Amino acid sequence: MKNDDEKYMRRCIQLSEKALKFGDNPFGCVIVGKDGTLVETRNKIKENDVTQHAEILAMREAQKLLKTSDLSAYTIYSNCEPCPMCSFMMRELKFKRVVFAVLFPEMGGYSKWNILEDKELLKFKPIFSNPPEVVTGILEKEALAVFEKAGWEMCK
């Protein structure tokens, strides 16, 4: 799976660069199933909606395309650790895997609040799923380079 993880992470990084070119925060997201890419998005917060995170846009689009809120057969990729808002959605949508490049310990839904692996959420089944497999550090240096271009503190 590592080759596929790198392939899809490269696409996330490209999308994060595109977001930066549009004057937005540098985030990109790809959702992948057994047949390949289902959805890919970039941040669009500049459109005056703070919920326009790349991951949220991708998850909304995937639900529309699949007409379900069960994405347990899918992997979601992001160039950066998902925030708490995105992490709760990932748990509720029951993703099989969550893969990201850069840890964000100040705000992350994995390294700060550990939403992605919180077993206590299982009390609320079927709303929340079992924790997904979490893979970190895929193409981290390449992803960090985009954040550095944006002048983000996390990279210093």
Image: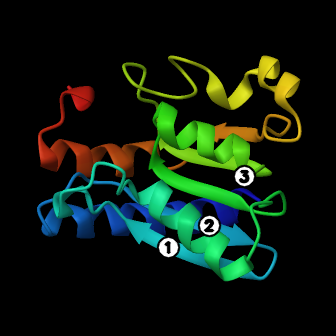
Q: Secondary structure at mark 1?
A: strand
Residue 150: percent from the left, percent from the top?
A: 14, 47
Q: Nearer the viewer, residue 154 or 45?
A: 45
* Residue 87 percent location from the top left of the image: 58, 38
Residue 31 — which label? 2
In the rendered image, is residue 136 in sight? no
Task: Estimate how packed mark 1 is, as few (under 14), some (14 to 19) or many (20 or more) residues with alpha carbons within 10 Å.
Answer: many
* Of the two numbered discs 3 and 1 in the rendering, the one whose residue sits closer to the viewer: 3
Q: Compared with residue 151, is residue 122 higher up or lower down, i.e. above or below?
A: above
| Residue 131 in picture, x, y percent from top left | 80, 34
Asked whether the beta carbons under mark 2 and mark 1 sit within 8 Å of each other, the answer is yes
- Quadrant where the C terminus sits is top left
Q: Left or right: 43 with respect to 40?
A: left
Do the CB atoms of the residues marked 3 and 1 lie less than 8 Å apart? no
**Secondary structure of the residue carrying numbered label 2:** strand
Mark 3: secondary structure = loop
Q: Quadrant of the N terminus?
A: bottom right
Q: Which residue is mark 1?
A: 40
Looking at the rendered structure, the kind of residue marked 2 is Ile
Q: Hey, what amino acid is under mark 3? A: Leu
Q: Which residue is mark 3?
A: 93
> Which callout, 3 or 2, points to the residue nearer the camera?
3
